[in-house]
Image: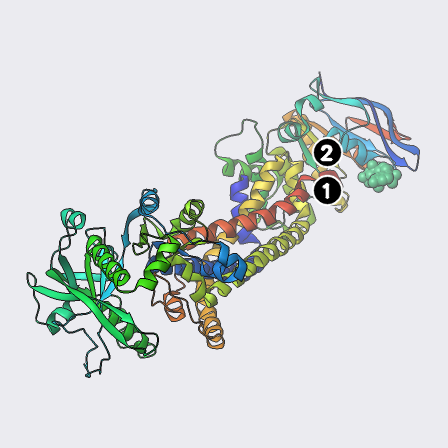
Amino acid sequence: MNFIKRGFLGITRNKGKSLILLAVIFILGNLISGAISIQQATSNVESNIKERLGAAATVEIDYEELDALSEAELMETEIEDIDIDLIKQIGELSYVKYYDYNMSTSLGSESIESYQGEDMEDLVQFGPSMDFMMKGINYAPVLDFEEEKAKLVDGRVFNEEEVENGTSVAIISQKLAELNNLHVGDTFTLSNMVFTYDDETGEEEIVTSRDVVLEVIGLFESQTLKEDAGEDSEDGMFDFMDMDYQNTIYVPNEIVRSETEYYWEELLKSDEEFAEMMEAEGEDSSFEYYTPMFVLNNPEDSEAFEEEVAPLLPKLYTVVSATDQYDSIAGPVESMSKLAKYVLAAAVIATVLIIGLVVLLFLRDRKRELGIYLSLGERRGRVVGQILIEVMVVALIGITLSLFSGNFIAGQVSDTMMKADHNTSQDEMMYFSEIQTNLTTEDVLDSYEVSLNSSYILIFYGIGLLTILISTVIPLVYILRLNPKKILM
Amino acid sequence: MMILEAKDLNYYYQDGDKRRYILKDTSVSFEKGKFYTILGQSGSGKTTLLSLLSALDSPHGGTVLFNDEDIKKIGYEKYRRNNVGIIFQSYNLIPTFTAVENVLIPMSITENDIPEDVKTVAYNLLDYIGIVQSKADRPVNKLSGGEQQRVAIARALATNVELILADEPTGNLDEEMEQEIIDIFKKMAHEHDKCVVVVTHSNEIAVQSDQAYLLRKGVLSSYE
Ligand SMILES: Nc1ncnc2c1ncn2[C@@H]1O[C@H](COP(=O)(O)OP(=O)(O)OP(=O)(O)O)[C@@H](O)[C@H]1O
Ligand SMILES: [Mg+2]
C-alpha cells in the first residue's frame, strides 16, 4: 500500500469525485485543445501560404515613402540607381539561394505575330506594335524556371558563355512558337524601332530601326495559371497577365542592354532638344537599369533578409518580399489566430483556478485521511505524490479525451467563423510589384485545416498537463500545512 | 531499561498575553512489558501529553526520550513511522479502504523489518485481534465501532513497534467491548513485551493496569 498504489486506489475508491474531476478537466481541456488546434491550423496556413508565395525578394523604390515627400523635398532628392555591384553584394548574403538581375525592353516585329489569347480575334493595331517583351537575364538557368513560374518544355536554358558574351539566343513561350511555327534551332527577327513623337500633331514617326535576330534555344510553358484554370472570378485579369507572359522573350542581359543603348543613341541623335536636356542632367548611363530578384533559401528568412539589406540601400529604396503579401490576404485567418490566443490564455487561467479550487475542496473532504498518513509517519512529499498521481491520472484521461473532441469542435467552429468573417470582408485590391502572386484570401481559407498532427498532440499534452500540474500545486500547499494532531485528536 | 521517558515537559496555550500551562515540568517514564494508564479529568491535558509522547506535537520545554534518544533527534516523522503505534478514540481509519488495507498502509510506510508476505501478516494480525477474514475484506465503515477499534489496534501493531500509545481507545465502546480491548492491551504488554500506555477516564481500566498515573494541574503523580 505505498503511496503510488494508494493514488490509484484513491481514484477508483472515490469514483464520484474522480468523475466530477474528469468532467471538469474534460470541459476545460476542450477549450484548451480547441484553441491550440486553431492556433496550430493558423500557423500551418501561414507557413503553407508563405511557402506558396515563395521566397522571392526584390529591391524597389519605396512608393509610399516617395508619396509622403513634399514637393520641395522631392525636388531635392535624387533617386540613385541600384548598381550591379550592390546587387551582387546583396546576392552574396547567406539568406540568398540564387539571384538574378534583369533589364527589359519592349520590341516589335514584322516577321512574327504576337500571342493574343486563345481565340485570336484580329486586333486592329495602331502604329508599330511593341508586343514583345525582351527580358534580359544574368542567371543562366533562368530564375523564372527555377521558381516554377514557367517550365522549360523543349530545348535548353542558357549557358554562362552566352550570358557573358550576350550571344543572340532566346527562350520563347511554346504558344508563341506554335503560333509562328518556330522550333528549337530556328531564328526569328525582332525590330528595334526608334520613333519620335510630335507634340503638335501627336503622330509617331519611325526614325530608324534595326533588326534583332535571335536563335530559339528553348521553349517554355507558363505554370502560374495551371491551378486556377476553370475558376471564373478573376480570369480576365489573369488572362491578360498571361498574354503578356506568353510574349516574353528571355535573352541574355547584354542583348537588352545593347538594344537599349542603340535606342537611346538614335533617339538623342534625332531629337536635339531632348539630347540637350539629358546633357544638362549629366546622366550618361540612365538607360542601363536593372531590376534585381533574389530568391531566399527559406521564406522565413524574409524578415532577417530585409533587416540586413535595408541599410545597404540608397535612399528611398525598400526591400519587397513575396511573403509581405501574406498579411493582405490572410485577414480572416489572422483574426482566428488572435482569437485562439485569447481563448487559450483565458482557458489556461480558468483551468488553473477551477481545477485548483476543485482539488482543494476534495482535499478538504479527505483531510482526515491525509492526517492519518502523516500520523503514521508518512513523508509529506509522498502524500503530495499520492494526490498528484490521483489528479494527474484523471487529468491524463480527461485531456486525452478532449484532445480529440476539442480538435473536432475547433474544426467545426473555425469553419463557420471564417466563412462568416470572409463574407463580411471585401477582398482588398492589392498592389502588385515586381513580385506577383495570384493567391487570394480564398486560397488562404482553403489551406486552413484543423488537423490532428503530432506537434498539436505534443503541445496540447504539454500545455494541458502543465496547467493542471500548476493548478494542483496550489492545494498541495494545504497538505504541507496540515497538522495531524488537530485533525485526529 | 526505560523505553520512553518524558523529562520536564512544558506545554501551554497563549491566552492573551498570559500563558495557560497545560503541562508544567512534567516527568514520567515507561518500560517494556508493562501496561500503563493515565487518568485525569476532562480538560486536564491527557491528550496533550499523549500528543507529545507520540510526536504529533512538540513541547514548549523539556524532552521526550525513546530508548534514551531524544525523539527530536530521531525525527518526529521517523519516530512515528518506526517506533510508536498510536490509537485514537475516534479510530481514524480510512473509510474508503478495507480493514486489511488499513493495516497494510503503515507496513508500507515503516522502515522496520517486517515479513515479506505483508498480506498474510495483516490477515493473521487481524485474526489474532478478533477480525476474521470476511470482515477484514470489508470497507471499514461497514464494521462496528468495536471492530473498527480492533482494526486500529492491528494497524498500530502492524509495524512491529514496542510502544503503543492510546488516547481513550474505549471511549466510544460499551463495557463488554471495552473489556475485550483492554484484554488485548494486557496481552500485548505481558505476552509480547510491549509497552502500552492508555489514556482513560475509567477507573475500571486503571485498576487493571500495572501502573496508573493521575494528571492534575499539569503534573503527573502515581494513582493508587
Ligand atoms: N487550541 C487550543 N487553544 C486553547 N486551549 C486549548 C486548545 N486545545 C485544547 N485546549 C485546552 O487545553 C486543555 C487540555 O486539553 P486536552 O485535550 O489535552 O484535555 P484532555 O485531558 O484530553 O480532555 P478530555 O478528557 O476531555 O479529552 C483543555 O483545557 C483545553 O481547553
Ligand atoms: Mg482527550
User: In which chain is the residue bearing label 1?
Assistant: A
Which is nearer the eye, A210 or B108? Answer: A210
Mark 1 vs 2: CB contact within 8 A: yes
Q: Colour scheme used in the picture?
A: rainbow
Q: Secondary structure at mark 1?
A: helix
**Chain letter, disc 2 residue:** B
Label 2 within 8 A of ligand 1 by Cβ: no
Instruction: Give the CA distance from mark 1 to mark 2.
Output: 10 Å
The residue beneath circle 1 is: A488
Q: Amino acid at mark 1?
A: Leu
Q: Amino acid at mark 2?
A: Leu
Q: Residue at x 34, y 65 (%)?
A: A437
Residue A119 image point, x, y percent: 19, 82
The answer to whether dots 1 and 2 both sit on one chain is: no
Q: Name the quarter showing ligand 2.
A: top right
| Residue A252, horizontal then vertical, whole percent | 19, 54
Query: Is any atom of residue B176 visible in this view?
Result: yes
Is A180 drawn above or below residue B136 in the view shown?
below
Q: Residues within 10 Å of mark 2 (few under 14, many from 20)?
A: many
Identify residue for label 2. Answer: B56
In the displayed structure, A199 sits above or below B21; it is below
Q: From the top left corner, tell me how far across and down residue A21 is, in percent.
A: 57, 57
| Mark 1 Cα-neighbour bin, 10 Å: few <14, some 14–19, many ≥20 | some
Nearest the eye: A273 or B24: A273
Position of A195 with respect to A16 (left or right) is left
Above or below residue B76? Residue A364 is: below
- Relative side of B104 to A48, left or right: right
Asked whether residue A131 is in view, the answer is no
Image location of residue A132, percent across then percent down: 21, 68
Taking B38 as reference, is A475 left or right? Answer: left
Q: Which image quadrant: the C terminus of chain A?
A: top right
